[in-house]
Amino acid sequence: LAGDSTMQDLLRGAFARFREGLNERDRQIWDERLQAEEPLRLEDLGDRFGVSKERVRQLEVRIKKRLKTFLEEELGDEVIIEALN
């Protein structure tokens, strides 16, 4: 269980560093959709940004891909695999 706590701390720190590198719009998608306990609807974010919900979905996919790359570089493949198990 101590390993779980360490892994959570590693991921929490990595997520915080990743978030710092996002632009304001991506940060809002991260905070209010990807990290929220009750995520906003794509349509609501689209209305806020003046884009379609499909565009917000595309931005979300892009953020997730960037996160995967970031975590692989920050923590290494082994840590990512362990976190997913």
Image (tube, rainbow, N blue to C red):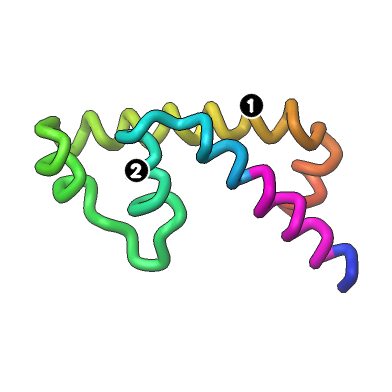
Residue range of the region highlighted in magenta in the rendering: 4-14
Looking at the image, which residue is at 52% across and 30% down?
Answer: 21
Q: Secondary structure at mark 1?
A: helix
Q: Residue furthest bottom?
A: 1
Q: Residue at x 33, y 59 (%)?
A: 39
Q: Which mark is residue 69?
A: 1
- N-terminal of the pair, mark 2 or mark 1, is 2
Tell me the kind of residue under disc 1: Thr
Q: Amino acid at mark 2?
A: Ile
Q: Residue at x 10, y 33 (%)?
A: 50
Name which quarter of the figure residue 80 lies in. Answer: top right
Whether residue 70 is in magenta: the answer is no
**Which numbered marker is on residue 29?**
2
| Label 2 neighbour load within 10 Å: few <14, some 14-19, many 20+ | many
Left/right placement of residue 29 relative to residue 67 reads left
Give the overall secondary structure of the magenta segment.
Answer: helix
Residue 37: x %, y % from top left: 41, 67
Which quadrant would the C terminus be assigned to in this image?
bottom right
Percent position (x, y) of residue 61?
41, 32
* Direction right: furthest residue: 2
Query: Is 13 a magenta residue?
Result: yes
- Left or right, 38 with reference to 19: left
Circle nearer the viewer, 2 or 1: 2
**Image disc number at residue 49:** none
